[in-house]
Image (tube, rainbow, N blue to C red):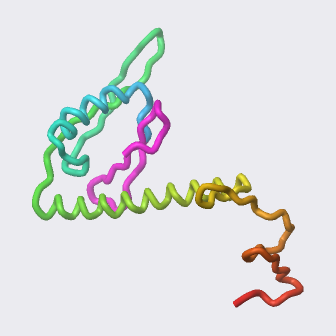
Amino acid sequence: MNTGSKNQRTLYLLRSGEFVPIQISLPPTSLTPYNSFYNAAFARRQRPLYNSIVRIGLKRMSSNGYDYSVATFCKVRDLSGEELAAVKAYADTFRVQIKNTLIEQAASKELESGAIEVGSGSMELPDNEAHFSVGMGIVDGEREKLPA
């Protein structure tokens, strides 16, 4: 799953025996090995990523006097039967949760910027100190009864 910038790839990994996936971000130096592995092991075979157990390692590299690591990928085995069904159900649920989280984050950023997108136009939030805006009117919670 890619949720990072163009020069980075974010992966969610469910490790054996754990219930919550970890998030790792692949740096630009690991994108080519990842893409090659993904294409050979999954895309060409039209298989989803959750279909297999994958081992991720690091390989030490050096260039122009700088040492760095590059991620390595190896498919251990394909999942099948009940094991595959359970992982697929988990992946589907997790994908929906991530999508909803990203939508909420985007909405939160819109609120922080002071504008909310509504259809094709936008509406500025009223600058009314600590008052609430309900429809077209303003309700002062200190002096007026709040609507039910």
Magenta stretch bounds: 1-24
Location of residue 85 in the rendering, given as x and y in whole percent from the top left corner: 18, 63
Most frequent secondary structure within the magenta stretch: loop
Residue that protrudes farthest toward the right in the picture: 143
Front-most of 141 and 65? 141
Front-most of 62 and 88? 88
Residue that protrudes farthest toward the front in the picture: 120
Lateral position of residue 9 relative to residue 146, left or right: left
Name which residue lies at 24% across and 51% down.
50
Q: How many marks do you count on the picture? A: 0
Location of residue 11 in the rendering, given as x and y in whole percent from the top left corner: 38, 44
Quarter of the figure with residue 139:
bottom right
Name which residue lies at 30% across and 52% down.
15
Location of residue 8 in the rendering, given as x and y in whole percent from the top left corner: 45, 34
Residue that protrudes farthest toward the left in the picture: 81
Say if 43 sits above or below 114 in the image.
above
Name which residue lies at 47% across and 15% down.
66
Front-most of 76 and 33? 33
Quarter of the figure with residue 143:
bottom right
Lateral position of residue 85 relative to residue 97, left or right: left
5 magenta-colored: yes
6 magenta-colored: yes
Lateral position of residue 108 relative to residue 145, left or right: left
Name which residue lies at 32% across and 53% down.
14
Quadrant of the snapshot with the C terminus: bottom right
Front-most of 137 and 10? 137
Location of residue 116 in the rendering, given as x and y in whole percent from the top left corner: 66, 59
